[in-house]
Image: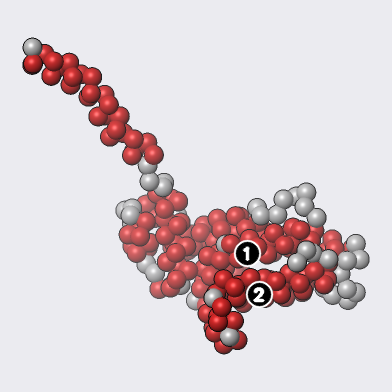
């Protein structure tokens, strides 16, 4: 009786045991390609692409090094894919039905939210890479320039300002802070009340400058 009960119990519980074992696989870790991109963004952004090997990226992603060659073929293609993914995330920040000013504010905030992209780009440029070799398109900057061009046509920009130069100057303000934040905060004394307070103050300055030109909310 005891043996039969044990057998019946085993028949009832065995499927549950197998189901529990399948659950982690069903949920699964991140797909190898995405894990490699995540690791590339972190390592390339911290040390620069030139100083990081594909084996280090694979180890950080916890996948076999051969998968880099399967998914990206070379480290350069991995770098371009990492930049492309981050750039697409930033470009998606501005809904088409926003006003020009609101869209520009969204892009500005998305720039700070996706700091990893700009740090990675800065590292690559410091390694001597040509931007044209890293990305074939620059969706974020193209949309920002286009927004300022429309504002110029609507008479919302001061006369004589080149929309491309305006886009470059305001973007440079944000990027300069992202890349040199520790130095800028300490050297100006902005770090006295904490880095988050410093970031909010810099954001307010940038949006005030934008608002002076196009009436964006501050």
Residue named by callout 2: 202
Q: Is residue 38 above or below residue 125?
A: above
- Using the numbered discs, state the Cα–Cα distance from disc 1 to disc 2 in whole angstroms: 13 Å
Q: First in sequence, mark 1 or 2: give its number.
A: 1
> Which residue shows up at 42% across the image and 60% down it?
39
In this orientation, which residue lies closer to the viewer: 166 or 194? 194
Extreme residue in the bottom direction: 187
On the question of residue 71 being in view, the answer is no
What x and y, as percent, mark residue 203?
67, 71
Q: Position of residue 56 (x, y in %)?
A: 34, 64
Left or right, residue 15 beside residue 217: left
Observer-side mark, 1 or 2, equals 2
Residue with the mark numbered 1: 111
For residue 211, what is the image quadrant? Answer: bottom right
Q: Residues within 10 Å of mark 2 (few under 14, many from 20)?
A: some
Task: Tell me the colour scheme of the image.
Answer: secondary structure
Corner quadrant of residue 176: bottom right
Q: Residue at x 41, y 53 (%)?
A: 35
The quadrant of the rendering that contains the N terminus is top left
Where residue 101 sits, quadrant-wise, is: bottom right
Front position in the image: 187 or 87: 187
Q: Is residue 87 left or right of residue 61?
A: right
Residue at x 71%, y 75% (from the top left corner): 205
Q: Name the secondary structure under disc 1.
A: helix
Q: Residue shown at 8%/16% (left/top)? A: 2
Residue 57 seen by the camera: yes
Which of 10 and 148 lies nearest the eye of the viewer? Answer: 10
Residue at the extreme front of the image, as rendered: 193
Badge 1 density bin: few <14, some 14–19, many ≥20, Cα 10 Å? many
Query: Which quadrant holds the C terminus?
Result: bottom right
């Amino acid at each position: 009786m005891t043996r039969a009960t044990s057998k019946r119990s085993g028949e009832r519980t065995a499927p549950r045991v197998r189901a529990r074992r399948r659950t982690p696989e069903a949920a699964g870790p991140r797909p190898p390609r995405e894990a490699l991109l995540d690791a590339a963004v972190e390592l390339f952004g911290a040390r620069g692409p030139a100083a990081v090997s594909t084996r280090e990226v694979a180890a950080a992603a916890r996948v076999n090094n051969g998968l880099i060659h399967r998914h990206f073929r070379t480290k350069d293609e991995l770098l371009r894919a990492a930049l492309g993914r981050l750039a697409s995330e930033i470009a998606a920040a501005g809904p088409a039905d926003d006003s020009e000013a609101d869209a520009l504010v969204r892009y500005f905030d998305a720039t700070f939210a996706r700091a990893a992209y700009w740090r990675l780009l800065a590292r690559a440029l410091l390694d001597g890479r040509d931007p044209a070799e890293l990305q074939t398109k620059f969706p974020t900057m193209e949309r920002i320039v286009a927004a300022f061009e429309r504002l110029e046509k609507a008479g919302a920009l001061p006369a004589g300002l080149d929309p491309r130069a305006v886009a470059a100057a305001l973007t440079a303000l944000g990027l300069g802070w992202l890349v040199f934040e520790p130095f800028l905060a300490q050297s100006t004394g902005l770090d006295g009340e904490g880095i988050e307070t410093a970031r909010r103050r810099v954001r307010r300055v940038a949006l005030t400058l934008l608002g002076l030109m196009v009436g964006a909310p501050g």
